[in-house]
Amino acid sequence: MPDEGGEKSERKSEQVAVNRKARFEYEILERFEAGLVLTGAEVKSVRDHKVSLSDSYARFQDGELYLVNLDIAPYEHAGGAPQEPKRARKLLLHRRELRKLVGKVAERGLTIIPLGVHFNNRGWAKVRLGLARGRQMYDKRRAIREREQKRDLARQMRKYG
């Protein structure tokens, strides 16, 4: 039943999965948002939060960007042919964004990793991508030390503030 006055009902953006290790393993230089090409059963499985972003990355193939190793569990109520959980899924970006990413990945040795999967307010599955550079072990140790110092400072502020 349509809303009175012709107003659209507002739907909020729904966060589905987050790659928590990405910010620790990589230094994120730029962020992008891309559409994700999925089958109907995969969309239902993503809506059930059955997605794993660990060890997934994006790579160029025939001038298009694909997300590799994104694990979407098979939807249990789906009929027909079973789906492959870790198949390469096409990412939808504007042509100028693709050209920009191709240049940066080729020239600097950077990688493209997924940071999160969500549904936008129109109900489309989107993936947040990060143009990233891998961190060395000493960088990871420094990040841990800084995080612990911030936590200690916040604890002291709560105690005396």
Image: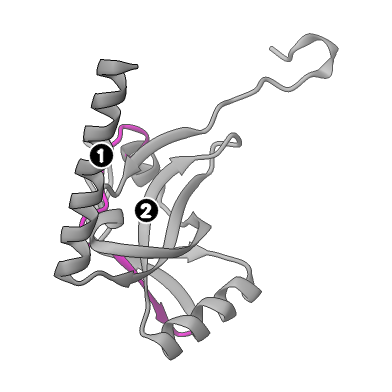
Q: Amino acid at mark 2?
A: Leu
- Picture quadrant of residue 158: top left
Residue 114 position in % (x across, y down): 36, 58
Residue 105 position in % (x across, y down): 43, 82
Residue 26 position in % (x across, y down): 29, 64
Q: Which of 134/41 is in front?
A: 134
Q: Secondary structure at mark 2?
A: strand
Q: Answer above or below: position of 104 versus 5.
A: below
Residue farthest to the top, as pictured? 4
Residue 88 seen by the camera: no
Magenta-span inclusion, residue 74: no
Magenta-span inclusion, residue 57: yes
Residue appearing at x 16%, y 68% in the figure: 138
The mark that comes first in sequence, 2 or 1, is: 1
Q: Which of 68/21 is in front?
A: 21
In magenta, the rendered stretch is 46-63
Q: Secondary structure at mark 1?
A: loop
Q: Is residue 154 left or right of residue 152?
A: right
Q: Is residue 102 left or right of residue 136?
A: right
Quarter of the figure that contains the C terminus: top left
Residue 40 got which mark?
none
Q: Amino acid at mark 1?
A: Lys
Q: Which residue is mark 2?
A: 115
Residue appearing at x 40%, y 51% in the figure: 39
- Picture quadrant of residue 5: top right
Local packing at callout 1 (Cα closer than 10 Å; few below 14, some 14-19, many 20+) is some
Residue appearing at x 52%, y 33% in the figure: 13
Q: Which residue is mark 1?
A: 50
